[in-house]
Image: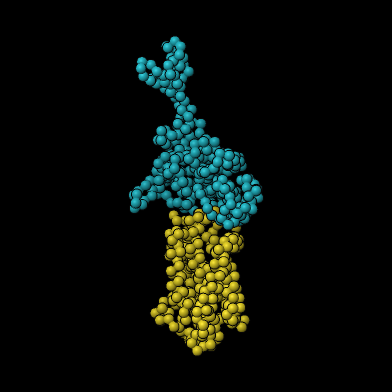
Chain colours: A cyan, B yellow
Amino acid sequence: MANQLAVSVQGLTKVYESKASGKKIAVDGIDLEVKVGEIFAILGPNGAGKTTAVEILEGYRDRDGGEVKVLGLDPAKLGSESWAWRNRIGIVLQSTNDSQDLSVSETVHHFANYYSNPRDSESVIHEVGLDEKANARIQSLSGGQRRRLDVALGIIGNPEILFLDEPTTGFDPEARRAFWDLIRKLRAEGTTILLTTHYLDEAEALADRVAVIVDGKIIEISTPENLGGRNTAKARINWFENGSRQEIQSDSPTAEVAKLASRFSGEVPELTVIRPSLEDIYLKMIGKS
Amino acid sequence: MKPNVLKVGLLRGGLEIKQFMRQRESVVFTLLFPVILLFIFGSVFKGEVGPSGVTFSQYFLAGMIASGLVNTGFQQLAIMIPIERDFGTLKRLRGTPISPVSYFIGKMIMVFAAMTVQIIALLIFGVAFFGLNMPTTFDKWLRFAWLILLGSICSAILGIAFSAVPKNGRGASAVVSPIVIILQFFSGVFFVFSDLPSWMQQFAALFPLKWLTQGMRSVFLPEGFATQEVAGNWEVSRIAIVLAIWAVAGTFLALRSFKWSEK
C-alpha cells in the first residue's frame, strides 16, 4: 500500500499566451510522485505555478505537455470514468465565495448527495469544528470558518485523495494550528493529501515530503528536515583579524572554534557562528536572499 | 452506487428555491415587477382592442405572463449563471461528481416555482383591481398549464445555453437585457401584435416569446378574438411544436456550450 502512487506527474508543462504579455511558461516540465497515504506539499512563492499545476491534476485545466495520472487516471482524458473519478477525489479550491444564503448544515448535507459513499454530514461538521455554526448562514462565517467549511465539502465524499490549495492563507495563528490538526487527523484516517502553500512553516509542520517550485520548475523534492541540504549545511564562522572580517565554512564548527581559541590564546575577536535557518535556506532556494 | 441524476436535480431544485427565497430583494422584484407593469399598462391604455370588446388590460395580461416566463427563465439564468461562475459556485460543483444535467434540472425547478408564484400574484391582482376575466373552461386551464410548463422549460434551458455568452457576471445584464426587451417589443407583449409591421411579426415568429404570448392570448381572450390574430386562429398545435423545437434545441445547445468556469 505504502508504495502505491496516488499521483504521478512527468514533464508537466503549461504555457499561457496572451496578447498583452506574450508567452508565459507557468509550469515548466515538472516531475513528482505522491504516495498513497502521505501528505505532500508543493511549496513556492506566489506566482510560481503551484495553483496551475494542481488545477491540472484536479482536472480543471488542460496541459500543454507531459504525463499525469491521478488515482490511475489521466484527468484530461476521463471520458466515461469522469463520475467515478470525481467520486474518489476531494478538492478545496484557493478561494470561494459561493452559497452565501445557505447554512453550513444545509450545504454539507446537500453536497453529501453527490457522492456514492459519503461521510456522515453531522460528524464531518463536528470534525471541522463547525458544530456551533451549523445553522449559521455562510455569509456570517469568518474567513477561517469558511475555509473549514470548504474542507468539510472537500471531504464529505470520503475521498481517497484531498487537494488543498493554500488552505490557511489569511488565518490567525490559532486557527492555523487547529487547521493543521484537522489535516493530520485526515491523514491518520488514510487520506492522501496534496497541498500547496507559500508558508514554509506549514510545509514543515504537515508534509512528509515537500517539492519547492520556483518559476514553474521544481528545484527540489525532499523531506522538510533535509530541505535545501539543511541537515548537512555548513556553519559559517567569522571573526575579526588583521584589520578585516575573516570567514570560513565548516562541517565541524566546534573544532574550528577550538583551533581559533588556541591561536588567539583566549578570546577570539568578534566571533560568530551561524547555522542557516530553514527560512534562510528557503529564501536562498527561491532566489530572494 | 451512483446517485440518480434526476434525484440530485430535484434536491438541487429545492436548494435553489431556498436560496432564491432568502434573497428578499429578488423575490419582491420578481413577483411584483409584472404586477407593476400590468398596473402601468392598465392605467395608461384604457379602452378596448379594436371593436372586439377585449380590454387592453386583458390583452396585456397574456403578454405579462409570457414575458414573465422569459424574464424569470431566460433573462434571470443568463445573468445569474455568469455571476455564479464569478463566485466560484460552478467551479466547486465541477470538482464534485454532480452531472450538469442535475444542475440544469435544479435551475428549471427554481424557474418553474418562481413562475408559478408570479402568475398567481398577477392573476389575483388582475382580477381584484382590473376586473380581468379568467378562463372558464377546463380545456383552457389545461392549455394554460402546459404552456407554463413548456414555456418554463424552454425559457430556462435557453437561459442556461446563453449563459456561456457573457464573459463575466458584471457584463451579463448588458448583454442579455437588450435582447429580451427587443423581443418583448417585437412579440406583442407591449403592443397589439397584429398592429405591428409584418417584418417585425415575421422576425418575432422565429423566437419562442411570440408563440408563448399568442398561446397566453388563446387562454385569456374570448374565442371570438382568434379571428383578429395574424393567422386568423390561435394556431395552438403550432405553438406547441415551436416551443418543443426550441426546448430540444436549447437542451442541445446548453449541453454543448455550458461552461462550469471561464477556462
Between residues A132 and A38, which one lies in front from this camera angle? A132
Horizontal and vertical percent position of residue A149: 58, 49
Residue depicted at x 38% and y 19%: A246
In the rendered structure, the answer to whether residue B113 lies left or right of residue A212 reads right
Between residues B41 and B102, which one lies in front from this camera angle? B41
Horizontal and vertical percent position of residue B104: 53, 63
Is any part of residue B48 visible from this angle? yes
Residue depicted at x 46% and y 48%: A56
Residue depicted at x 36% and y 51%: A17
As displayed, is residue A148 above or below residue A285? below
Task: Using the rendered view, name the quadrant where residue B176 is placed.
Answer: bottom left
Which residue is situated farthest in the top direction here? A265
Residue depicted at x 57% and y 74%: B122
Is any part of residue B255 visible from this angle? no
In the rendered structure, the answer to whether residue A228 lies left or right of residue A157 reads left
Task: Using the rendered view, name the quadrant where residue A171 is placed.
Answer: top right
Q: Quadrant of the N terminus of chain B?
A: bottom right
Horizontal and vertical percent position of residue A22: 34, 49
As displayed, is residue A257 above or below residue B259? above
Which residue is situated farthest in the bottom direction here? B51
Q: Quadrant of the C terminus of chain B?
A: bottom left
Horizontal and vertical percent position of residue A262: 44, 11
Between residues A101 and A91, which one lies in front from this camera angle? A101
For the image, the number of numbered tags is: 0
